[in-house]
């Protein structure tokens, strides 16, 4: 069972709870997303597995997920990158924001990395992947083409 830090409206840790409890009780928590670019400047997006509870079959960032109890944002980003797409590359923090979703606040940090692969996708997490130009992703967000809401939030902030 995954445990998360619960945070207040100022992103200060106040307690911890299981991920299920966080969503049932709409508790504020922390999220990370990683954008992986290749040498052509294309962005790797993953399609979420049909096994995912929320937004199965939707496009999302290269990797991402919850910051677990006691974990830093950067540790979570590196863990998610390894778990979901099987790589370990240097990451740079490129954005921090909060995002109100279903009556709870998620505090996000977004990291950027560069890799050409090879990738080892976790089939429990990832149904597929593809390289996209940032312009194409921006258009997909505008047209709401099976886009995870956090991907939309990240793209609208970083590439308006």
Image (cartoon, helix red, strand yellow):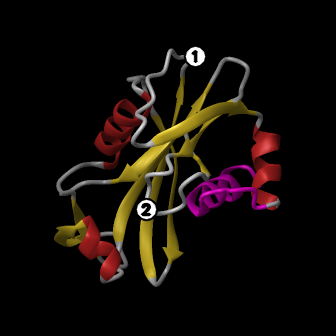
Q: Mark 1 points at which residue?
A: 116
Q: Is residue 153 magenta?
A: yes
Which range is magenta? 144-160
Left-right relation of 60 to 131:
left
Where residue 148 sits, quadrant-wise, is bottom right
Mark pair 1, 2: CA separation: 29 Å
Rendered-image quadrant of the C terminus = bottom right
Please tell me which of labels 1 and 2 falls first in the chain.
2
**Horizontal and vertical percent position of residue 88:** 38, 23
In the picture shown, does residue 65 fall above or below 122? below
**Horizontal and vertical percent position of residue 11:** 34, 69
Rendered-image quadrant of the N terminus = bottom left
Where residue 125 sits, quadrant-wise, is top left
Q: Is residue 7 magenta?
A: no
Which secondary structure, mark 1? loop
**Residue at image x 43%, y 36%?**
123
Which secondary structure, mark 2? loop
Left-right relation of 41 to 2:
right
In the picture shown, does residue 14 fall above or below 133? below
**Horizontal and vertical percent position of residue 46:** 57, 39
Left-right relation of 20 to 94:
left
Instruction: Give the camera-side residue of 46 and 17.
Output: 46
Q: Residue 29 carries which label?
A: none
Q: Mark 2 points at which residue?
A: 53
């Amino acid at each position: 069972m995954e445990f998360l830090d619960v945070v207040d409206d100022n992103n200060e840790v106040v307690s911890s709870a299981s991920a299920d409890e966080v969503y049932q009780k709409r508790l504020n928590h922390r999220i990370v997303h990683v954008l992986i670019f290749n040498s052509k400047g294309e962005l790797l997006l993953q399609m979420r597995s049909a096994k995912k509870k929320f937004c199965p079959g939707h496009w999302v960032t290269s990797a991402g997920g919850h910051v677990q109890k006691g974990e830093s944002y950067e540790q979570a980003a590196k863990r998610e990158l390894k778990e979901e797409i099987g790589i370990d590359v240097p990451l740079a923090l490129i954005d921090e924001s909060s995002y109100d979703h279903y009556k709870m606040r998620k505090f996000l940090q977004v990291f950027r990395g560069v890799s050409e692969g090879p990738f080892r996708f976790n089939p429990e997490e990832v149904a597929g992947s593809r390289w996209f130009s940032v312009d194409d992703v921006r258009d997909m967000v505008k047209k709401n083409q099976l886009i995870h809401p956090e991907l939309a939030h990240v793209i609208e902030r970083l590439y308006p």
